[in-house]
Amino acid sequence: MSLNTGTPPILRVDRLVKRYGERVALAGLSLQIPPGQRVALLGPNGAGKSTLFQVLTGLFAADEGDVDVAGIAVRRSPSAALRHIGVVFQQMSLDLDLSVERNLRFHADLHGLPRSVTTERIALGCAAMGLGTELGRTVRELSGGNRRKVELVRALLHRPALVLMDEPTVGLDPKSRRDLLAAIRADVAARASSVLWATHLVEEAEAADRVVVLHKGKLLADGTPAEVAAALGGTRLEEAFIHATT
Ligand SMILES: Nc1ncnc2c1ncn2[C@@H]1O[C@H](COP(=O)(O)OP(=O)(O)OP(=O)(O)O)[C@@H](O)[C@H]1O
């Protein structure tokens, strides 16, 4: 594949298996992501995207296989590996009754960031997302779009090597969706962070550096959007994806 940069991967997923009873959600999945790559994880409902995120973030243990983040084995040293991950979950996970700033400071404290660094990063991150005037408001008072933006500022606050986002643009209007994607693009350009981002939306996947298609817990295709469309037997990614997964 043309995207192999030859640098050590930030994320290495090796033959991952996760079962729920008889149901196999991840069926021996392997995947590597080098620094500085924005990877869309495209899959239909039930493909295993959320399960993969839950294993990557240590919420569930895999039945088989291994995950390394920045060279650290999640199975052996989960908290050390997690320090290198920033997450935007599918469900909102901010404290509704705390202010935006308190939510962000709480996260910074968990990561042991010095106060002055935290203050600067919160100011920069919130300004970049158009949240500069929202710092003192409780999350409950914010629109859904602004809550998502706060979650992204939080995910980036400790400058993680790997950013995981589980359908982060669901429910966002086009402008908020564009802002969120632009903020991620800027972070990757500035720090060579790596992003793995689950989506159902083919148009979003088309804007990624690389698309991995997950179907029934396995990788169906992996490459640039054009390579993946061709591998799935089409010229347009959307048609090829629908054809291959239904
Ligand atoms: N807690 C659970 N118990 C039993 N089966 C589960 C559980 N969570 C997920 N599954 C099953 O595992 C498979 C993968 O589900 P998962 O939620 O990871 O897919 P997904 O790609 O995130 O789907 P969606 O796009 O609908 O969120 C599905 O068959 C699902 O029914």
Image: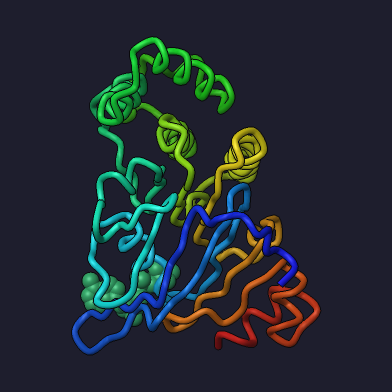
For the point 30% across and 36% down, the residue is: 94
**In the image, ligand 1 is in what quadrant?**
bottom left
Relative placement, left or right, of 220 versus 110 is: right
The number of callouts visible is: 0
Toward the viewer: 45 or 41? 41
Q: Position of residue 19 (x, y in %)?
A: 26, 80
Which quadrant is the C terminus positioned in? bottom right
| Quadrant in the rendering for residue 206 | bottom right
Relative placement, left or right, of 6 versus 25 is: right
| Quadrant in the rendering for residue 128 | top right
For the point 36% across and 75% down, the residue is: 16
User: For the view shown, which residue lies furthest in the top direction?
Assistant: 116
| Quadrant in the rendering for residue 240 | bottom right
Residue 243, placed above or below residue 12:
below
Q: Position of residue 140 (x, y in %)?
A: 31, 30
Residue 139, placed above or below residue 212:
above
For the point 55% across and 55% down, the residue is: 8
Which quadrant is the N terminus positioned in? bottom right
Q: Position of residue 80 (x, y in %)?
A: 29, 44
Relative placement, left or right, of 240 versus 48 is: right
Residue 227, placed above or below residue 186:
below
Q: Position of residue 120 (x, y in %)?
A: 47, 14
User: For the view shown, which residue lies furthest in the left direction?
Assistant: 21
User: For the view shown, which residue lies furthest in the right direction?
Assistant: 235
